[in-house]
């Protein structure tokens, strides 16, 4: 399985749609292993993650690890967490933050990669792009409604708001997230990684 995953990575790097990334010296930013227990599906790597070649290597990642109740060593252990953003390359800066992940990117690669991960017990959907893609019609009209309905998706999936520092107003307006969702998330993660 590892060889198949390596082959998919090589295909991603060589794909015509990623020629611009090759020219910039970018590597695809994701981390997987055949025995991963948790799939963490987010938006797209930020600039710091792209430059360091380490996913979630920023303030958002620090906050996310706090929510998950794991340390850096656990988070970056690919046998525990498969880290799969909706696009594996930093999309660039937009008018109000980073640009969204490219449409169609996950269609090309996610299904093939996930098919190689036979031990997944939990999928964590971080942000609206991942939730709309993976929940489809089961997603609510807004991210807030989807996250507040987290119990509907348990035990195999849980939706989260993005842990970006830019979301501090959302978190202040929605104290139930830290009070209810984060403890449920930590309990799920602990159960899966200690099983």
Image (cartoon, rainbow, N blue to C red):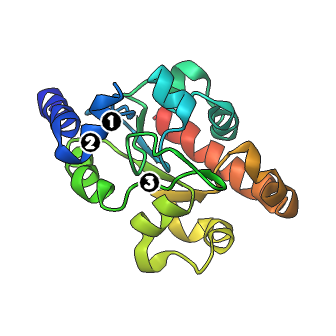
What secondary structure is marked by label 2?
A: helix
What secondary structure is marked by label 1?
A: helix
Residue carrying label 2:
18
* Residue 70 in view (yes/no): yes
Quarter of the view holding residue 5: top left
- Label of residue 36 in the image: none
* Of residues 86 and 38, the one drawn nearer to the viewer in this rendering: 86
Residue 40 % position (x, y): 47, 44
Q: Is residue 38 above or below residue 71?
A: below
Residue carrying label 3:
101
* Marks 1 and 2, how far apart at CA: 5 Å
Residue carrying label 1:
21
Instruction: Rate crowding at label 3 as few (under 14), some (14 to 19) or many (20 or more) other CA atoms within 10 Å.
Output: many
Residue 162 % position (x, y): 63, 51
Q: Is residue 101 left or right of residue 111?
A: right
Q: Is residue 22 above or below residue 178?
A: above
Image depth: mark 3 or mark 1 in front: 1
Quarter of the view holding residue 96: bottom right
Q: Is residue 55 above or below residue 45?
A: above
Q: Earlier in the sequence, mark 3 or mark 2?
A: 2
Q: Is residue 114 left or right of residue 103?
A: left
């Amino acid at each position: 399985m590892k060889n198949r995953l390596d082959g998919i990575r090589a295909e991603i790097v060589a794909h015509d749609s990623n020629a611009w990334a090759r020219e910039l010296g970018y590597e695809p930013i994701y981390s997987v292993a055949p025995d991963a227990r948790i799939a963490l599906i987010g938006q797209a790597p930020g600039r710091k993650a792209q430059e360091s070649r380490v996913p979630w290597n920023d303030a958002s990642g620090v906050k996310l690890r706090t929510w998950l109740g794991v340390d850096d060593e656990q988070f970056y252990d690919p046998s525990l967490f498969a880290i799969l953003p909706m696009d594996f390359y930093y999309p660039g800066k937009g008018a109000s933050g980073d640009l969204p992940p490219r449409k169609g990117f996950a269609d090309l690669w996610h299904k093939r990669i996930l098919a190689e991960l036979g031990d997944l017990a939990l999928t964590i959907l971080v942000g609206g792009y991942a939730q709309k893609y993976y929940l489809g019609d089961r997603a609510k009209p807004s991210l807030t409604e989807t996250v507040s309905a987290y119990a509907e998706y348990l035990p195999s999936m849980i939706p989260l708001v993005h842990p970006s520092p830019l979301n501090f107003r959302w978190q202040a307006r929605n104290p139930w997230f830290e009070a209810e969702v984060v403890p449920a998330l930590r309990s799920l993660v602990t159960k899966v990684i200690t099983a």
